[in-house]
Image (tube, helix red, strand yellow):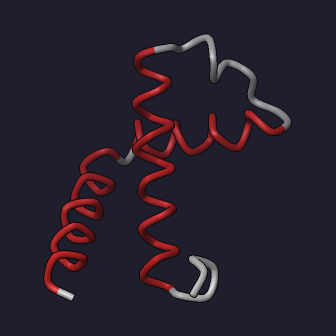
Amino acid sequence: MSALFNFHSFLTVVLLVICTCTYIKMQFPTILEQRTGFRGFFWKAARIGERLSPWVALGCFAMGISIILF
């Protein structure tokens, strides 16, 4: 089943994209400078990770626990 049809997988992919984009923006800020176009999507994901980092971290932790248990 693809990640688009399984809500659990979809949330996992979204959280991983947010965490990865935030990490890339912290390590290599020039890569995600562009705020429009294709890279604009990843800039927005990095922005979410920066501003909501405690909630994203809690979501990643909860998702990790749910993957291990279920």
Would residue 32 appear left or right of 60 to someone viewing this image? right
Give residue 10's position: percent from left, percent from top: 52, 74
Quadrant of the frame with the N terminus? bottom right
Query: Relative to 15, is 52 above or below?
Result: above
Give residue 36's position: percent from left, percent from top: 82, 33
Give residue 23's position: percent from left, percent from top: 40, 30
Query: Relative to 37, is 53 above or below?
Result: below
Q: Camera-side residue: 46 or 2?
A: 2
What number of labels is visible? 0
Name of the residue lying farthest toward the front: 1
Q: Camera-side residue: 54 or 18?
A: 18
Name the residue rendered at 21%, 70% in the picture.
Answer: 62
Query: Relative to 36, is 6 above or below?
Result: below
Q: Quadrant of residue 22?
A: top left
Name the residue rendered at 61%, 88% in the picture.
Answer: 5
Name the residue rendered at 63%, 79% in the picture.
Answer: 4
Would residue 4 appear left or right of 29 to someone viewing this image? right
Q: Camera-side residue: 53 or 9?
A: 9
Name of the residue lying farthest toward the right: 37
Name the residue rendered at 67%, 18% in the picture.
Answer: 33
Would residue 61 appear left or right of 53 to someone viewing this image? left
Query: Relative to 28, is 39 above or below?
Result: below
Q: Quadrant of residue 69?
A: bottom left
Quadrant of the frame with the C terminus? bottom left
